[in-house]
Image (spheres, coloured by chain):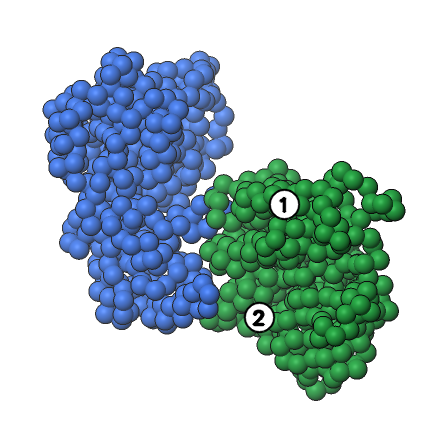
Amino acid sequence: MRPAALAALTAGLARTGNPSSLHTAGRAARRTVEEAREQIAAALGARPSEVVWTAGGTEADNLAVKGLFWARRTQDPSRRRVVVSAVEHHAVLDPAFWLAEHAGAELALLPVDGEGRVELDALRAELEEHGDAVALVSVMWANNEVGTLQPLEEVVGLAHRYGVPVHADAVQAVGQVPVDLRASGVDALTVSGHKVGGPGATGALLARRGLDLTPVLHGGGQERGVRSGTLDPALLAAFAAAVDEAVVTREEHAARVGTLRDDLVRRVLQAVPGATLRGPADATHRLPGNAHLTFAGCEGDSLLYLLDAAGVEASTGSACQAGVPRPSHVLLAMGVGEDDARGALRFSFGATSTADDVDAVVDVLPGAVERARAAGLSMAVGA
Amino acid sequence: MRVLAAMSGGVDSAVAAARAVDAGHDVVGVHMALSRTPAQERTGSRGCCSIEDASDARRAADVLGIPYYVWDMSERFEATVVADFLSEYAAGRTPNPCVRCNEHVKFAALLDKAVALGFDAVCTGHYARVVEGVDGARELHRAADAAKDQSYVLAVMGPERLARALFPLGDVASKAEVRAEAVARGLSVAAKPDSYDICFVADGDTQGFLRRALGEQPGDIVDEDGAVVGTHDGAYAYTVGQRRGLSLGRPAPDGRPRYVLAVEPVRRRVVVGPAEHLDVAHVRGDAAVWFGTVPPAGASCTVQVRAHGADVPARVLAADAGSVTVDVADGGVRGVAPGQSLVLYDGTRVLGQATVAATRTAADLAGAASDGPA
């Protein structure tokens, strides 16, 4: 956790008080919550009243997708279509699938190009054909696996022409690229604490003033009735401190991790035969701290083990409930074959990453890939 | 050594992994995902492919402080163990899927991948002992706890694979000792029930599983003279030696119970008869695997012909690299089903194993001495 967030958290934990209470302790707690709200709003181009606290990015995404769908359909029963990109995080995709299965929604998945960018022509066609029936569009700010920045300005321009609200999951983007609710024109925006060096289980949905959201959590009526539940001042203060610092230091951070990332990609492509960079070829179209590569003929789990054993922590993407690594839906949507998708590795650069880390990866990776290839080949069924 | 501990999510493999850690090895836990169905979630804790088992294995690895991975072996498992299970039943034999899993998955695909990734050995929670023989060769022996011994299902791996296998539970006195050790180590799987069912038959209903996969193939149940005494929905549902579940409409003339003597899927026939016609004299096995030299004809040994079956005295009639025939006439062996494993022992030491191909009863030998060898 960022020191500023940790300081805010530990200072806050020592204090008691429910921000919904009227007594002195309650008022002090409320003040902390509201200052955090002002801080996060200022950092992300929103008004304080546009911040809805949630217990993380997943809840904020659920509130956006379900809340917008229910609200729009209540106003106009013909608006039943939920339009989301095929490369969304599961926190957006799965609520959309759930609405289609259980709440009468029609799901439209927007295809992406080979670099993971939403096909604007497909969105245009969708809106031309079904514009009056669309309840919402959800397109992430930047993809969590391959780092692709989405053309949100164009998405917003198209959707608003048909009176359709746009939600953007910006969990990966905050602190990496400029994120500003008002400037983007986006109607609702998800942000999460743990991705910016804040505490886990903190998040917020920034929802443009006047945007109708049907609650997902009902109860005591906190957050103007949109999201009930007692708030934790210490967690929120730490969350806001982390977001604030991530935004203030963004430019410097992005330049630093971008240099490391570019160095890693260049050297890995040179050193490892069969390595392919996935996502945008132009580094300015992807998150600065993201590198995503596939290694033909390798099982991702073999690579993961070999790298971990050598002290390098990477990620393969997603796993099913039992923990079985699955080919990523993002890569498959980009047109990557299932076999290639199995040999995927994502390297994320953060505040603690150094040039030595890049050297370590470049040292270890060629041997690991060679070994993983040998192990992969011995798995051929019938061998 | 760098040791890969195969962790099913059960208590045995968890304690085995713990003992490998204690022995000073560099241990990594791996749970094999064997089911193609992603949401195979069961009530209870049987089998080895449920989500609950995967998280139990992860929890145990966390307690032991070792890295943990899930490896997807489902394709291999389907293509070998499950496919073999179905084709063997369809052919009227009675397969042992645990033997096939050890042969094709655990001590084959898993071990190969482990070795390719730089591991020296695979550790499992099987009850069997590996002993270094006089000539330095590694021998497979029955476990100290005869009741839990699993050398019968392990013999198929052969000596080369055995050299890379680690069975830390071979010496324990009883399962109770393993459970007590799990409690002492703070492993939450200590009280988890044992698994007895076939792991890929989710509800334990093997008959239903076979019927769904193979379809109904109705036919007759006949006596040894060919007289029809009942009907069935699929010969594959019957096993040689089986008595229960025949639902014969007509009692035997002598009123004695009848047993399945033969399963003939091509003719869709199940042959039944009296118990003494199951008394086996000779057993022939194919696909033999030997630990050390092939035993000479005339050698005395003991054999086990089914999982959890008794150790019975036997004599080798003929043996070569690929097959073996044993005389078990004095062993009181009844109803050996083709497809089961025939494992030969010298005391506690495994000599080798083969897959039962055919048997001859005492009556066969008396009546048809000119038919050639069994």
Crowdedness of circle 1 by 10 Å Cα count: few (<14), some, many (20+)?
some
Residue drawn at x 26%, y 35% is A109
Marks 1 and 2: same chain? yes
In the displayed structure image, the side of residue A111 where residue B251 appears, left or right: right
In which image quadrant can residue A261 be found? Answer: bottom left
Name the residue that disc number 1 marks. Answer: B219
The colour with which the image depicts chain A is blue
Residue drawn at x 72%, y 79% is B318
In which image quadrant can residue B355 be found? Answer: bottom right
Q: Is residue A46 visible?
A: no
From the image, state whether disc 1 or disc 2 is nearer to you.
1
Can you say which quadrant of the picture contains the N terminus of chain B?
Answer: bottom right
Name the residue that disc number 2 marks. Answer: B121
Looking at the rendered structure, the secondary structure element under dot 1 is strand
Q: Chain of mark 2?
A: B
Indicate the chain coloured green by its letter. B
Query: Of the residues shown, which amino acid type is indicated by label 1?
Result: Gly
In the displayed structure image, the side of residue A38 where residue A285 appears, left or right: left
- How far is the residue under mark 1 from the one under mark 2? 49 Å
